[in-house]
Image (spheres, rainbow, N blue to C red):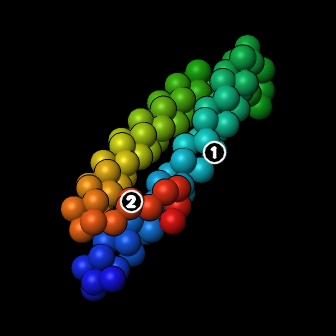
Amino acid sequence: MSDRADYYKKLRTRASNLRTELDDGIQAFMTVDRRVDEIGKADFDEPGELSTTDYDDLKTCVEKVLFYARMAEKASNDHISELDRELRNLGLEPLSGNA
């Protein structure tokens, strides 16, 4: 196997690992988003409850994290597709999964 093929396989593995970590992060922040929604069900009139303004800020921040994480995931997927194409151009089968 050529050095170039080894290089692309190494890049593909790294990109796949990144995609896995992004998926894990998105799943975690989806759980955070649900928890924020739970907090938002309070009356906002009792001592110790999150104010409406703070709730809105928290909700916005979590939604933005999810939006940008999904953008990063798309970029990662596009990068993996490019690497798979290069591997095919070298006559190799693209790696599957996290390989």
Q: 72 left or right of 34? A: left
Q: Position of residue 70 (x, y in %)?
A: 42, 40
Task: State whether residue 79 appears in this view.
Answer: no
Instruction: Indicate the quadrant where residue 8 lies.
Output: bottom left
Crowding at label 2, few (<14), some or many (≥20) Cα neighbours within 10 Å? some
Identify which residue, 65 or 23, lies in the foreground: 23
Q: Which residue is mark 1?
A: 28
Q: 88 left or right of 36? A: left
The number of numbered badges drawn on the structure is 2
Give the farthest residue toward the front: 91
Task: Name the residue rendered at 27%, 85% in the picture.
Answer: 3
Task: Name the residue rendered at 37%, 48% in the picture.
Answer: 77
Identify which residue, 96 or 77, lies in the foreground: 96
Q: Position of residue 90 (x, y in %)?
A: 24, 68
Compute the Cα span from label 2 to label 1: 29 Å
Checking the image for residue 78, the label placed there is none
* 2 vs 1, front mark: 2
Q: Position of residue 49 (x, y in %)?
A: 73, 27
The amino acid on which the numbered mark 1 sits, given as a three-letter code, is Ala
Q: Helix, strand or loop at disc 1?
A: helix
Instruction: Indicate the quadrant where residue 88 lies.
Output: bottom left
Checking the image for residue 94, the label placed there is 2
> Between disc 2 and disc 1, whose residue precedes?
1
Task: Name the residue rendered at 25%, 79% in the picture.
Answer: 4
The amino acid on which the numbered mark 2 sits, given as a three-letter code, is Pro
The relative height of residue 65 versus residue 98 in the rendered view (above or below) is above
Q: Helix, strand or loop at disc 2?
A: loop
Quadrant in which the N terminus appears:
bottom left
